[in-house]
Amino acid sequence: MAFRTWAKLVGTAFGAAALVGAGQLGLAYGLGVLTFSRVVEVTDRDVWTAQLAWVSWFAMTAAAAGGLAGRAHLTSRSGAGSRLIGGIAAGLGAATTVPLTMHPARSAEIAGVNAVFVIGACAVLGASAGIFAAWAALGRNAARWNLVTVGAAVWLLALVSVAPSLRSGEQLPTVRLGVLDAGFVPDDLVERGSLFTMPALALICGLLVGLAARRHQMSTVAVALAGLPGPALLALAYLIAGPGSGRLQELPYWAATTAVGAGVLGSVLAAVLSRGPATDRPRPAARPTSERPPLPQRDAQPESAIAQAATRSGAPLPGAGAAQAITGRAAVPARASVAARAAVAAQRPDEELRPSDTGVITMPPFNGFSPPQNPQR
C-alpha cells in the first residue's frame, strides 16, 4: 500500500474510534447509564460491576466502529497485515475512553476499591480487545453486519430501560448491559429475563445476519461464523467486569457467555437451511467483487488470419451439404474442406475409392530376384 493510503486508513480508524467512544460515553452520562457520583456499599457491589461492563463495552465497540470506518480505505491488494495495522489504530483511538472515564470516577466512593484505577484498567482492556473486533470488521462483511446489529439492539434495550426515568423526580435505575431493566417490568420477570435476553438476542441476530450472508453467496464457513463477533464482545465485557457478588450481576454474566453459543447456533442454522428445490433455470453469473475479480478476456482481433478466413465469402465446396447432413453441424471454413471430401468419399463404391480417401496405400510386394512388373490398373 502507498503511504497516502496507509495514512488515510490509520487516520480514519483512529478518528472514528475516538469519536464513537466519546459519543457513547457522553450519551451514557446524559441518560444516567453511567453514574460515578453515587456511594456504593459493600453489599451493593453489583451496581459498580454493572458499570464496569458498560465501560468495557464502550471501548470495544468504539474500536469496532473505527474498523468499520477504515474499511473504505482498503484496496483489493490489502492483506492481513494492513487490516492489523488498521485494527491497532482503531484500538488506540478507542483508548481515548480511558481518561474520559477515569476523571469522573474520582468522585465515586466504592468501599475497598480504587475506583479510578479499576475503571481505567477496564477501559484499557476493552480497547485492547477491540483491536481484534476492528480487525474482523476490516476483513469480513458478515462480521460488520453482526457487530452493527448487536450494538444497535443493546442500545435499544438501554434506551427502553432509562426512558421511564427521564421524567422529573424519577430515580435513575441500574441499567445492566444487554438486559431490559425498565421500571414498568415486574422484578421477577426482569430477573428471569436477564438470563435469556442476551442469548435470544444473539440467536436472532445470528440467524438474520447468516441469511443475509448466504444471500450474498458467501462461503459456508463465513455464514456459519456470522453470528460470533457481536456476542463475543458482550461476553468479553462481562468477563472483564467480573461476575459480581450477587444475582444482580451473576445472571447476566452467565447469559453473556451463553450468548456466544446462541449466536453461532443462529448463523449455523442459516448455513444449513434448505436452499429450496433445484430448478432448470441457469444461475446468474456471480458479480465481480474485491475477493472475486472478473476473469480476463481476450480482445477481438479482426485482422488475424483466422478471422479473415472465417469471414471470407465464396462458393460452397462440393459436398458441403452432405457433410452438414452427416455431421449435423453447420460447415465452418476451417473444417468444410475435410468434411466435404469425407462425405463425397463415403458416397463412392469401394472399387472407386482412392488411397487419399481411405488413407491406406497398398504397395506391391518386393522381390529382389525378379524384375519389377508394372501393376495392372
Image (cartoon, rainbow, N blue to C red):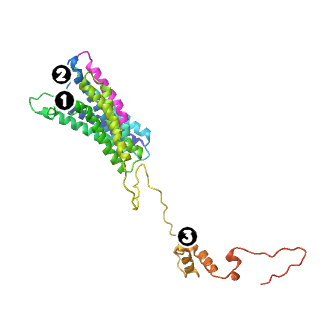
Look at the picture and state if 244 lies above or below 311.
above
Quickly name the residue at label 3: 306
What secondary structure is found at the residue carrying circle 3?
Answer: helix
Q: Which residues are magenta?
A: 111-133
Please tell me whether mark 3 or mark 1 is closer to you in this view. 1
Q: Amino acid at mark 1?
A: Asp
* Distance (Cα) linking label 3 and label 2: 88 Å
Residue 259 image offset from top left, x and y in percent: 31, 35
Q: Is residue 70 visible?
A: no
Which mark, by number, is residue 188? 1
Residue 210 image offset from top left, x and y in percent: 34, 45
- Whether the residues at callouts 3 and 1 have beta carbons within 8 Å, the answer is no
> Does residue 117 belong to the magenta stretch?
yes
Look at the picture and state if 285 lies above or below 343.
above
Q: Is residue 110 left or right of residue 71?
A: left
Quickly name the residue at label 2: 38
341 or 130, nearer to the observer: 341
Q: How would you rate the neighbour count of disc 1 (Cα within 10 Å): few for under 14, some for 14-19, many for 20 or more?
A: few
* For marks 2 and 1 on the same chain, the one whose residue lies earlier in the sequence: 2
Q: Residue at x 25, y 22 (%)?
A: 246
* For marks 3 and 1 on the same chain, the one whose residue lies earlier in the sequence: 1
